Amino acid sequence: MDIITLVFWVITVIWFIFSIIKDKPKTINAVKMSGGMIKGMAGEIIAILFLIGIILTFIPPETIKQFMGQSNAVISTVVCALVGSITLIPAFVAFPLAGSLVNSGASIIPVVAFITTLTMVGVVTFPLEKKEFGTKFTVVRNSLSFVFAILIALIMGVMTWV
């Protein structure tokens, strides 16, 4: 356990003790409520782990490293951005997946392109957005989001090299 995690645990325990001293029934009620929330999210967390496991099973680390780490950075970034644009998964699933991709040898630039387009560009949600905001707005917003996602990925790549 690193020092930052340890500091957060100490701060949490201190505040928890302070809360129990100040209002024990309210603290116990809050702990019960949070336990219920954790039970409700347990299925989603297990699904995240399962999804990441399946993805990493079907796509071996060598393939990830070859395509997203050693190949042409421009091509892999654009392909990952396109995949992110048409994928509809929640961000809390995408972030652990991105971490697993980086741990498997992927370069940070394609991974950032994937994550940013995943959260900023909505090809799957295009019909709904078009209905609510109009075609012109939807096309312009998605196009600008795609361009800015690529720029963000490139900036993150430069920041990791410095």
Image (cartoon, rainbow, N blue to C red):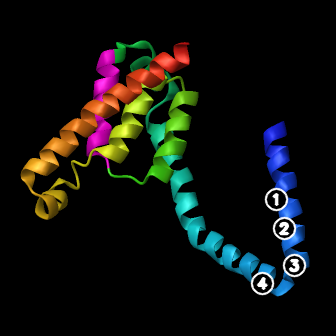
Q: Is residue 47 left or right of residue 75?
A: right
Q: Name the kind of residue labelled 3 in the image.
A: Lys
Could you tell me if residue 71 is visible in this image?
Answer: yes
Up the image or down, 82 lies above or below 154; here it is below
* Residue at 82% in and 87% down: 25
Residues marked 2 and 1 touching at CB (< 8 Å): yes
Residues marked 2 and 3 touching at CB (< 8 Å): no
Horizontal and vertical percent for residue 102? 53, 29
Instruction: Measure the C-alpha gap from mark 2 to mark 3.
Output: 10 Å
- The residue wearing badge 2 is 16
- The residue wearing badge 3 is 22
Q: Which residues are magenta?
A: 74-87
Instruction: Measure the C-alpha gap from mark 2 to mark 1.
Output: 6 Å
- The residue wearing badge 1 is 12
Q: Is residue 81 left or right of residue 58?
A: left
- The residue wearing badge 4 is 26
- Secondary structure under the numbered disc 4 in the rendered image: helix
Q: Residue furthest front?
A: 22
Residues marked 4 and 1 touching at CB (< 8 Å): no
Q: Earlier in the sequence, mark 1 or mark 3?
A: 1
Mark 3, Cα crowd under 10 Å, few <14 / some 14-19 / many 20+, is few
Residues marked 1 and 3 touching at CB (< 8 Å): no
Instruction: Measure the C-alpha gap from mark 2 to mark 4.
Output: 12 Å
- Secondary structure under the numbered disc 2 in the rendered image: helix
Quadrant where the C terminus sits is top right
Instruction: Measure the C-alpha gap from mark 3 to mark 4.
Output: 9 Å
Horizontal and vertical percent for residue 156? 47, 24
Horizontal and vertical percent for residue 13? 87, 61
Please, what is the dominant secondary structure of the magenta stretch?
helix
Q: Name the kind of residue labelled 2 in the image.
A: Phe
